[in-house]
Image (tube, grey):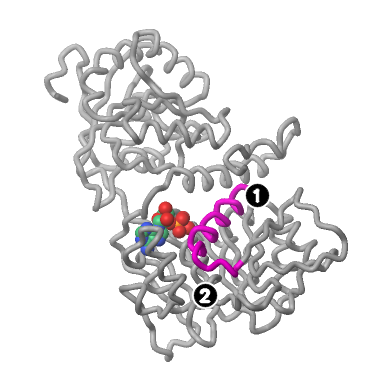
Amino acid sequence: DSSSVAVKSEVQGEKKPADEDDKDDKAAQSLLNKLIRSNLVSNTNQVEVLQKDPNSPLYSVKSFEELRLKPQLLNGVYGMGFNRPSKIQETALPMMLAEPPQNLIAQSQSGTGKTAAFVLAMLSHVEPNNKYPQCLCVSPTYELALQTGKVIEQMGKQYEEVKLVYAIRGNKLPRGTKLHEQIVIGTPGTMLDWCSKFKFIDPKKIKVFVLDEADVMIATQGHQDQSIRIQRMLPENCQMLLFSATFEETVWNFAQRIVPEPNIIKLKREEETLDTIKQYYVLCNSREEKFQALCNIYGAITIAQAMVFCHTRKTAGWLAGELSREGHQVALLSGEMQVEQRAAVIDRFRNGKEKVLVTTNVCARGIDVEQVSVVINFDLPVDRDGNPDNETYLHRIGRTGRFGKRGLAINMVDSKSSMNILTRIQEHFSKNIEKLDTDDLDEIE
Ligand code: ADP
């Protein structure tokens, strides 16, 4: 049962190097976003396209019908409630379904429809009467592989001849097994073993190779090498597809080693702005005073839903406890929780079961909770050197064009140094942050 799987389990009790932490963090965040995401992230930017052959016509589709999918698959797509292709799918799908198949590197933030796109491509290319693996898909972790597997199962629900198998640690097959499932999804190490050491899969018969979450993948050194070794065993005419949410230099170098002669498509994240946000600060002398100030504004902020950010887990835990003691209903999101638990907390908050979510900077990084209209910085965001973390400030408080509802941000200041941070944030964005007197709240109400 995948829903009980804990992301942390594989590393418990071991001391990990820093980059392992980072990798866990990235994989966990990605999983969390998948677990809580129930629809597409809207994006009004243009898709940038770089074609391998700039002379070949560039198709983009506005409907799934135009793709001439098998009826079972078209039904599968509609059965998932998709009415039309997402922005990235409009361009990616015709490229992936073209004859001859084209290689693709695609980048767009999580929630824009990449998984659905490559799942549809794999299902379209499978020859159901051939009872051997034809599509390989590698993901950075077991849990992420399971999530993608679920999408394959859902979309392929009416395509019963097509079967799926997981190449993941723990799934042990007898020696000499030859797989008859058409799609294999798994992590790089086991996938490589199944292709080379155990020969459960004949790599020469693979038609589509998908590498998902390339940015998470390269955070683990071994994964990069294993993926490249799998790729080298595949036939030259195998379609290579690579997806990533972000695209730093290192991801890009890796992508080019996996995907020869690629088409490249990118969809930039929508810009965030502070224009529609009212920003305030509250001057206090201690943590306790900050807590008192928060209690004073509590009634005003819980008209809407509010997120409260603290610098450490300890402060977040303390604050959530104190607020509960005052009789307030609050949710706590903490890094100590397993991913599944965190997803459940976010889900309850999104459904309005709790009005206030207390969390840490690290824990909430990369999570989009669109309907939050009040953000409280119980501690201001700072980086490791204690400098203002402007990017986090913007991401936490800012809005994108589409969700340009008015918002409210309240920053708690309790020392000279935090006042200094606030001043620098204010200067960075050239946006005034007004002083708020929490004994006189007419202003924010
Ligand atoms: P990504 O892989 O980029 O994170 P997903 O493919 O997981 O994005 O899609 C994000 C969410 O949007 C999922 O809940 C998915 O079911 C949904 N979705 C994907 N494509 C469409 C579409 N064309 N129409 C409506 N919803 C979609």
Q: Is mark 1 within 8 Å of ligand 1?
A: no
Q: Is residue 172 left or right of residue 224?
A: right
Q: Is residue 198 left or right of residue 139?
A: right
The quarter of the picture showing ligand 1? bottom left
Verify whether residue 7 appears in magenta: no
Amino acid type, mark 2: Ser
Which of the labelled discs sits on residue 441, or is there none?
A: none
Q: Residue at x 36, y 55 (%)?
A: 40
Q: Nearer the viewer, mark 2 or mark 1?
A: 2
Q: Is residue 19 left or right of residue 174?
A: left
Q: Residue at x 78, y 63 (%)?
A: 194
Amino acid type, mark 1: Tyr
Residue interval drawn in magenta: 141-162
Residue at numbered disc 1 = 142
Verify whether residue 146 appears in magenta: yes
Callout 1: 10 Å neighbours few (<14), some, many (20+)? some
**Which quadrant: the C terminus?**
top left
Q: Residue at x 28, y 61 (%)?
A: 44
Q: Secondary structure at mark 1?
A: helix
Q: Is residue 164 above or below residue 237?
A: above
Which of the labelled discs sits on residue 124, or is there none?
A: 2
Callout 2: 10 Å neighbours few (<14), some, many (20+)? some
